[in-house]
Structures are given as structure tokens and as C-alpha cells.
Image: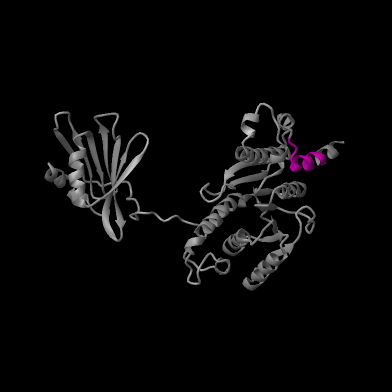
């Protein structure tokens, strides 16, 4: 039996094989489909079999001879096998009594074969093999251009952030310089990445300002920017709430600004009429101190749960307030939860369509919460309406 399957499959068992598909299970509560494709494992050609059940998939790496043996066993419980190869296509139908009908098409497979890499390498916006000065100086990359293993999470975070930037680039003005402010930039990993991507790689006309309260960190970042010749990247020491160094801003970035600092940054962005806002909040204590609700007391009595509910509530209120101010808002996952629980990103793009959310006011009253952003933005709105 094994030799018979070997005779059918042998001409196709090479690196050009697109896939082998085994389908039509005779028992509905078992494996539903099996796919086999070639992969390179430690520079050796093997064949990866993926067995799909209703809820999961199991993978096996097999030699060519093991494929023939496995197929012989699998086909006792399946009705059909199909081989897709550039040279030819093969279809095998198996009846209930075990009779096989083999059909061959010599026209070849119209579907290109999949890449052979066993662990397909993720394509990053920042190429991990190209040396970048700021990545080295920030400790993410070696001089030879290899990502430091212990800093790979930071490298992935940078690339994830740049994916969000890539999505909103069409929203920025095309006929003049775009002004971008990064509030609470800290060590500025993402600020440098943003400038490098937009100005150095994509050649957009942008001016980026990084603002933070830590004077020593700002001095260091400014020196790095000058060393790299990043003429349109500036770092300043300052407070988010008081900063007024520009007349207009096209995009505001606020990543991990602590507690109500995020609120002041968002309020500033709205007052400037920023076209794009990207915000990843950090610690959020204000609502946690305020929230009270008799109905929710059985839940809120647990400190950890109360803290997490308050953080989610804070971001939901912020998103609604931005919608009230005329922004289209998305609440997205910034990075995987395994890296940090502070992984929510608010992405807001100015649409001009304001929403009055009376239900938001009612909810805040019911929970006895009054976030800083609500006070700042509604005070301005009420003054404008008066």
C-alpha cells in the first residue's frame, strides 16, 4: 500500500510542490483536512503536514519516506487526495471499498508554491539587519546591525507603532510641512523611529518636537538628534499643559504619559485642531479614586479588578469625548498583552462630525466619575456655545 502511494506521489515530492490536500473525512468527529507542503528546516528539505480538527491544528515535520507511510494510513479514513505541483496536478478518489481512481492533469498547478522557510520571517518596517545609528545608541541594535535579543520586544514595539503611523500618513498635509508633537517622549525610542521612518525613509516634509519634563533625558536626546543630522527633530523640556511653542500642530502623539498628563495632551491636540491623535495611556488613577456605584460594589470591592475597570473606563470616556470633539476614534491593541498590560492605543482622525453623547454624561453621573479630560473639553465647548 505504501509503495502504491509512493508511485503516485514520488514525482511531486520536491521543493516545487505547492501542497498536498487530503480531504473528505469518513468520520465527522475526527481530523477534517490534512495539508502537506515542503519546508526548509536547518537547510534540509522536509514536509510539514498540518492536520486540522474543528478547533485546532497539529503540525508534523516528515521526511519523504515518512510522507508515503503517513499518507497510506491517513487515506484509510479520507475520500480524496489532491496534489498541486507546477509539473502536474493529481487527484485521487477513494471509494468506501478502498478502490482508488487516479486522475492526472499535466498542465501543472496554477497556484504558486508557498515560501519554503519553516518559520517565515516577519517583514518589519525597520529592517532588523540594516544598521541604524539611533537603534544602536538606544541599545536596541549592535554595531553590526543585529537586534539585541533582550531588546527585541522594544524593536517589535517600534515597528508596531510605525504600522499605525503608516496608516495615517495620508491624513497629513501634502502641500506644506507637517508638525508633529510627541508629548512625554521619555527616552524617545518611538520619536526617533517616527522621524527616521517619515523623514529619512519616506522623505516626508515633517518637523517633529519631543517634549518631556526630564531635563537630562531631553539633553541626551537632543544631542543624539544633532549627531545624526536630524535637523527637523527637536527635543524640549516642558510641561504638556503649558506648552505653547507652536501655532498649529498636525499630529499629536502621547505615549505612556502618566495619569492625567494624557488628558492634558489630548485637550491640547483638540484645541490645536490636530488632524491625527495617537495616544497610548499609562497609569490611570483618577477614575479609580472616584468611581462609586452601589450596583457594582460586589465587583469594585476587589482592588485589582477595580483598577483595571477604571483604566478601561477612562479610555472609553476619552474615546467618546474625542468623538464629541469631531474625531473618528478607534481603540486598538498596541502590542501583545504578554509584553505589557498598558497596550491600548487610541487613534483619532479629525472628521469634523461632532457627536453629543448625552448617555456618556449619564454614565459618568451614575458612576460618580469626572475625568480631567471631560472637564477640560466640555468647559471649552460650553464657553463656545455661550
> Is residue 141 among the parts visible in the rendering?
yes
In the image, what residue occupies the spot 23% across and 39% down? 81
- Tell me the chief SS of the magenta region: helix
Percent position of residue 338, x then y: 51, 48
Q: Residue at x 67, y 45 (%)?
A: 284
**Residue 190 placed where, x, y %?**
61, 58
Q: Residue at x 76, y 56 (%)?
A: 239
Q: In which quadrant of the rendered image does the C terminus lie?
A: top right
Q: Is residue 232 visible?
A: no
Q: Which residues are magenta?
A: 369-379
Q: Quadrant of the N terminus?
A: top left
Towards the viewer: 165 or 241: 241
Q: Is residue 45 left or right of residue 246?
A: left
Rendering quarter of residue 29: top left
Give the residue drawn at x 22%, y 52%: 63
Q: Is residue 328 above or below residue 87?
A: above
Magenta includes 370? yes
Tell me: residue 144, above or below residue 209.
below
282 to the left or right of 42: right
Query: For residue 331, which quarter of the picture?
Result: top right
Number of labels in the image equals 0
Q: Position of residue 201 (x, y in %)?
A: 57, 63
Q: Is residue 148 left or right of residue 317?
A: left
Amino acid at each position: 500500500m505504501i509503495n502504491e502511494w509512493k508511485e503516485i506521489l514520488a514525482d511531486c515530492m520536491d521543493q516545487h510542490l505547492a501542497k498536498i490536500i487530503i480531504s473528505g473525512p469518513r468520520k465527522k468527529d475526527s481530523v477534517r483536512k490534512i495539508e502537506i507542503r515542503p519546508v526548509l528546516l536547518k537547510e534540509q528539505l522536509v514536509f510539514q503536514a498540518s492536520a486540522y480538527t474543528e478547533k485546532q491544528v497539529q503540525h508534523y515535520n516528515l521526511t519523504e519516506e515518512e510522507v508515503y507511510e503517513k499518507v497510506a494510513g491517513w487515506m484509510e479514513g479520507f475520500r480524496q487526495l489532491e496534489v498541486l505541483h507546477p509539473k502536474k496536478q493529481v487527484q485521487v478518489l477513494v471509494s468506501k471499498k478502498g478502490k482508488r481512481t487516479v486522475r492526472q492533469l499535466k498542465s501543472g498547478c496554477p497556484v504558486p508554491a508557498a515560501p519554503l522557510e519553516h518559520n517565515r520571517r516577519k517583514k518589519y518596517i525597520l529592517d532588523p539587519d540594516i544598521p541604524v545609528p539611533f537603534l544602536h545608541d538606544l541599545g536596541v541594535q549592535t554595531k553590526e546591525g543585529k537586534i539585541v535579543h533582550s531588546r527585541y520586544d522594544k524593536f517589535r514595539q517600534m515597528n508596531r507603532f510605525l504600522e499605525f503611523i503608516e496608516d495615517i500618513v495620508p491624513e497629513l498635509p501634502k502641500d506644506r510641512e507637517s508638525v508633529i508633537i510627541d508629548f512625554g517622549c521619555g527616552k524617545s525610542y518611538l520619536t526617533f523611529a517616527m522621524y527616521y521612518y517619515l523623514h529619512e525613509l519616506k522623505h516626508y516634509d515633517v518637523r517633529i518636537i519631543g517634549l518631556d519634563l526630564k531635563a537630562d533625558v531631553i539633553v541626551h536626546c537632543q544631542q543624539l538628534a544633532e549627531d545624526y543630522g536630524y535637523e527637523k527633530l527637536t527635543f524640549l523640556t516642558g510641561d504638556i499643559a503649558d506648552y505653547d511653542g507652536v501655532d498649529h500642530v498636525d499630529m499629536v502623539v502621547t505615549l505612556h504619559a502618566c495619569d492625567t498628563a494624557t488628558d492634558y495632551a489630548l485637550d491640547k491636540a483638540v484645541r490645536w485642531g490636530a488632524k491625527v491623535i495617537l495616544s497610548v495611556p499609562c497609569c490611570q488613577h483618577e477614575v479609580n479614586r472616584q468611581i462609586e456605584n452601589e450596583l457594582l460594589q460586589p465587583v469594585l470591592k476587589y482592588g485589582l479588578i477595580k483598577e483595571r475597570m477604571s483604566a478601561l473606563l477612562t479610555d472609553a470616556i476619552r474615546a467618546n469625548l474625542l468623538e464629541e470633539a469631531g474625531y473618528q476614534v478607534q481603540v486598538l491593541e498596541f502590542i501583545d498583552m504578554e509584553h505589557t498590560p498598558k497596550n491600548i492605543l487610541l487613534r483619532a482622525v479629525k472628521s469634523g462630525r461632532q457627536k453629543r453623547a448625552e448617555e456618556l454624561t449619564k454614565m459618568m453621573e451614575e458612576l460618580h466619575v469626572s475625568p480631567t479630560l471631560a472637564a477640560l473639553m466640555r468647559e471649552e465647548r460650553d464657553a463656545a456655545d455661550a
